[in-house]
Image: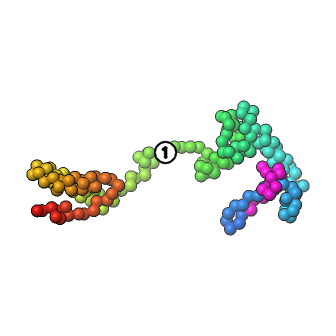
């Protein structure tokens, strides 16, 4: 990783929480001293040694495609199938976080197998759909009658109304089709 201030290699990594938001800073040793951040405590040597070995493994990368963990973090893509095995220790927490704590993909489970009831249909919506179907049937009958009696202007209006009501994106609006038509 590079220093956030000067683009040198970052050796100090600071994670703070400000107003509930995690803020992560990566600094080189010189910038950390300038900001007054203390260097790592010598008593933490064994822990830091372990961190160095993990970092070395990350830097070494995949033997098959030579992708490093830093490259994965930067681009979000692994190079090959072997990367999953090489970076397993680093990927496990990321996958658990991405899957809300789970580390296995379970797929979509049908509702009938989970025992969850299907969502109940709203009676008002059902009534509206039934009324719409009745209105469409009545309009089709009126259209047939208008064509048979050669009332083509009325038939055109009825056809347009049928198209408007048949479009699923629009909600039906009650309109009186006989306005101005009963001549």
Residue 82 or residue 132, whichever sits in front: 132
The part of the image, by quadrant, that contains residue 5 is: bottom right
Rendering coords of residue 101 (x, y %): 61, 51
The residue most toward the front is 153
The answer to whether residue 180 is seen in the rendering is yes
Rendering coords of residue 68 (x, y %): 74, 40
Q: Main secondary structure of the magenta part?
A: loop
Q: Tell me which residue sits at (43%, 48%) in the image.
A: 111
Whether residue 144 is situated above or below residue 67 in the rendered picture: below
Q: Secondary structure at mark 1?
A: loop
Is 80 magenta? The answer is no
The residue most toward the left is 149
Q: Tell me which residue sits at (82%, 55%) in the image.
A: 6
Label 1 crowding class (10 Å Cα cut-off): few <14, some 14-19, many 20+?
A: few
Whether residue 64 is situated above or below residue 151 in the rendered picture: above
The residue most toward the bottom is 19
User: What span is colored magenta in the figure?
Assistant: 1-16
Q: Tell me which residue sits at (67%, 65%) in the image.
A: 20
| On-image quarter of the C terminus | bottom left
Please name the colour scheme applied to the rendered image. Answer: rainbow
Residue 179 or residue 87, whichever sits in front: 179
Tell me: 115 left or right of 156.
right
Whether residue 76 is situated above or below residue 16 in the rendered picture: above
Rendering coords of residue 122 (x, y %): 33, 59
Residue holding disc 1: 108
Q: Tell me which residue sits at (35%, 55%) in the image.
A: 169
Is 3 magenta? The answer is yes
Tell me: 95 left or right of 5.
left
Tell me: 116 left or right of 65.
left
């Amino acid at each position: 990783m590079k220093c956030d201030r000067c683009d040198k290699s970052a050796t100090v990594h600071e994670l703070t929480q400000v107003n509930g938001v995690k803020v992560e800073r990566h600094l080189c040793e010189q910038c950390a001293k300038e900001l007054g951040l203390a260097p790592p405590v010598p008593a933490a040597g064994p822990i830091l040694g372990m961190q160095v070995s993990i970092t070395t493994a990350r830097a070494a990368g995949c033997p098959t495609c030579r992708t490093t963990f830093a490259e994965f973090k930067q681009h979000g893509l692994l190079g090959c199938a072997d990367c999953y095995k090489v970076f397993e220790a680093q990927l496990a927490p990321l996958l658990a976080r991405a899957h809300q704590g789970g580390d296995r993909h379970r797929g979509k489970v049908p509702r009938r197998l989970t025992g969850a009831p299907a969502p109940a249909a709203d009676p008002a919506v059902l009534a509206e759909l039934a009324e719409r179907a009745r209105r469409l049937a009545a309009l089709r009958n009126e259209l047939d009658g208008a064509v048979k009696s050669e009332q083509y202007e009325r038939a055109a209006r009825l056809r347009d109304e049928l198209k408007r009501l048949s479009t699923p994106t629009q909600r039906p609006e009650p309109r009186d089709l006989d306005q101005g038509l009963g001549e």
